Image: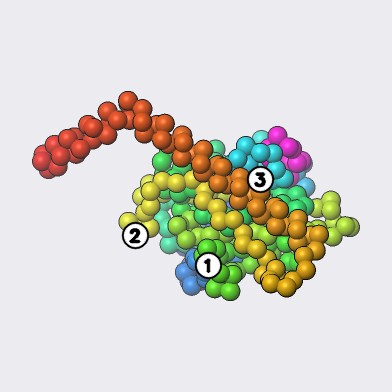
Amino acid sequence: MLLYPIARPRTCENVGVAVDLVDPKLLAKAAELHRQFESARPFRHLVIDAFIDPAACLELQTSFPAFSADRARNELGEIGRKAVVPELGTLGPAYQRFDRMLRSKPFRDWLGQVTGIPALLYDPVYVGGGTHENLDRQDLDPHIDFNYHPATGLHRRLNLILFLNPEWQEEWGGALELHVDPWLPPEQDEVTRIVPLANRCVIFETTERSWHGFRRIQLPDDKRQLSRRSIAVYYYTRHRPLPEAAPSHGTLYVPRQLPGHIQPGYTLRDEDVEEIRLLLARRDRQIQFLYQRELDYSRVAQSPTYRLARALAWPIRKLLGRKR
């Protein structure tokens, strides 16, 4: 049974139609929120506390799916400590109601007003999205996301993350970090950190510079039963501004640099050695992954079908250009 009542639909004067679950005060502040979104650094984003009805958020927390190793396979095919469940509609009434709001046109219209990105489209299969759960010792290297939907070819434009952790402290790690550029030396890389507390919503653009990730979760001994929980939703458009366009790519990671305290003359502790081993192992796996992807691309590029398509492409483009 739902822990919150089925209330009358809330309306937004600017949108003009019902938007469920979102705090009515937020619905009337689209213009103000848009200004915050536009002025945020290191790239356009927005942090909203008390995003949905507190009782609805509590219901999402209590019906969050149990961790499953089968759901915790990463991009390299390894079983890790992050579980993903994209099928929100199967997780009970609270998730079904939240999903209905996310996909509704009134909510997408309001989100478009807030972000200045019109005609947002919802992904019903939640590619890469859904519930996310990270266990102790899990981290996520800074990265930019894949930029086209793999099935529809739509432009990925916006990430919406709702955190579901009733307690969390910044010193535990796991805070969402937004980077200027993780390739820069740490002292030059401006970073905004967002503690993942329950009912805190983060909305940010998906571009070639929206670098984000989080540092390793290190829970105290008496909090090891906790995990970092969230719902991630991605929105798309049919087109995007030409200056923002880029060739299609998958998620691109930047391995973290050595911790700043490791300097000449410093005596390594056991935990420092372990950290260095982890960083090197991760970098080696990424190099191996990129090498394999290069081999796969080379096999495709050398195939007779690909060569024929390349040979025909130029005459066809030339002919089409002449007809114009």
Badge number at residue 28: none
Query: Could you tell me how far apart the alpha carbons at marks 2 and 1 are, in whole angstroms?
Result: 23 Å
Residue sitting farthest toward the front: 265
Instruction: List the residue tagged with mark 2.
Output: 243
Q: Is residue 10 visible?
A: no
Instruction: List the residue tagged with mark 3.
Output: 131
- Quadrant of the frame with the N terminus: top right
Residue sitting farthest toward the right: 222
Instruction: List the residue tagged with mark 1.
Output: 184
Q: Is residue 292 visible?
A: yes
Which-is-in-front pick, marks 1 and 3?
Answer: 1
Q: Is residue 159 left or right of residue 275?
A: left
Looking at marks 3 and 2 on the same chain, the residue that comes earlier in the sequence is marked by 3
Which-is-in-front pick, marks 2 and 1?
Answer: 1
Q: Position of residue 129 (x, y in %)?
A: 59, 45
- The residue positioned 38% from the left and 52% from the top of the image is 246
Q: Position of residue 144 (x, y in %)?
A: 51, 54
Looking at marks 1 and 3 on the same chain, the residue that comes earlier in the sequence is marked by 3
- Magenta stretch: includes residue 84: no
- Magenta stretch: includes residue 65: yes
> What is the three-letter code of the residue carrying label 2?
Pro
Q: Are marks 1 and 3 in contact (CB under 8 Å)?
A: no
Span highlighted in magenta in the image? 64-73
Q: Is residue 225 left or right of residue 254?
A: right
- The residue positioned 17% from the left and 35% from the top of the image is 315
